[in-house]
Amino acid sequence: MEFNDIYDENRQRTGRIHQRGTRWNPGEFGLVVCVWVYDGRGHLLLTRRAEGKSFAGTWENSGGAAQAGETSRQAIVRELFEETGIRAAEEEFELLGTERDRNTFYDFYCLKRQVKLKDIVLLPGETDDVMWASFGKVHWMVRTGKICKIIGHQFHKQEKELRLRNFNKFRR
């Protein structure tokens, strides 16, 4: 059983917790974190959602819900490690932006890592494959439904910033 902190509309913790999988009440918000891992050579790391998960068989970046008591950065460190085996310190993650929808705050990060696919450790029941994909391939995957719509939408919104970081010749 997993629990998440409940935040108010101003992103302040309320001191109450929410049981994952149950309905959120109006005015209650959770926190979800996502990370685009890039290699500095024009590729993004994608994992495929395992059978039995929502959107099974589609590709995504790593991420998930912050557990009760976790900060955003603690959650992204844990989620990335759980889903890929990649270890990174909190300060290595660059915040791309924050959004809010009906019941969730989202924090979007990026992280530069050059890691071999054979060194990725997938989490059974969560992820079942991994790849490095070029920006062109990610666009194709979004168009063909191989990446779920919400992830594709975020990719399009964050693509410019990801390209600036990912291609050394465009570095600021």
Image (cartoon, rainbow, N blue to C red):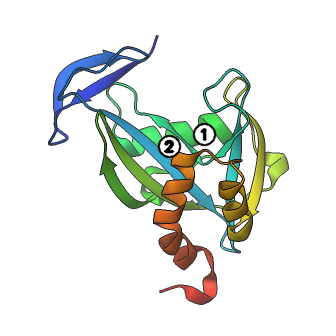
Regarding residue 114, the answer to whether it shows in the image is no
Q: Residue furthest front?
A: 144
Q: Is residue 6 left or right of residue 109?
A: left
Q: Is residue 162 left or right of residue 44?
A: left
Please give the residue where the numbered disc 2 appears in the rendered image: 77
Q: Position of residue 11 (x, y in %)?
A: 20, 41
**Disc ID at residue 167:** none
Please give the residue where the numbered disc 1 appears in the rendered image: 81
Residue at image position (44%, 38%) is 75
The vertical placement of 15 against 76, above or below, is above
Q: Position of residue 55 (x, y in %)?
A: 63, 33
The vertical placement of 30 against 120, above or below, is above
Report the number of numbered marks: 2
* Label pair 2/1, CB-CB below 8 angstroms: yes
Q: Residue furthest right?
A: 118
Residue at image position (48%, 65%) is 158
Q: Is residue 81 left or right of residue 132?
A: left
Which amino acid type corresponds to the residue marked 1 in the rendered image?
Phe
Q: Quadrant of residue 134?
A: bottom right
Which amino acid type corresponds to the residue marked 2 in the rendered image?
Val
Q: CA distance from mark 2 to mark 1?
A: 6 Å
Q: Quadrant of residue 49?
A: top right
Mark 1 is surrounded, within 10 Å at the Cα level, by few (under 14), some (14 to 19) or many (20 or more) other residues, namely some
Regarding residue 111, the answer to whether it shows in the image is yes
Label 2 secondary element:
helix
The vertical placement of 161 against 110, above or below, is below
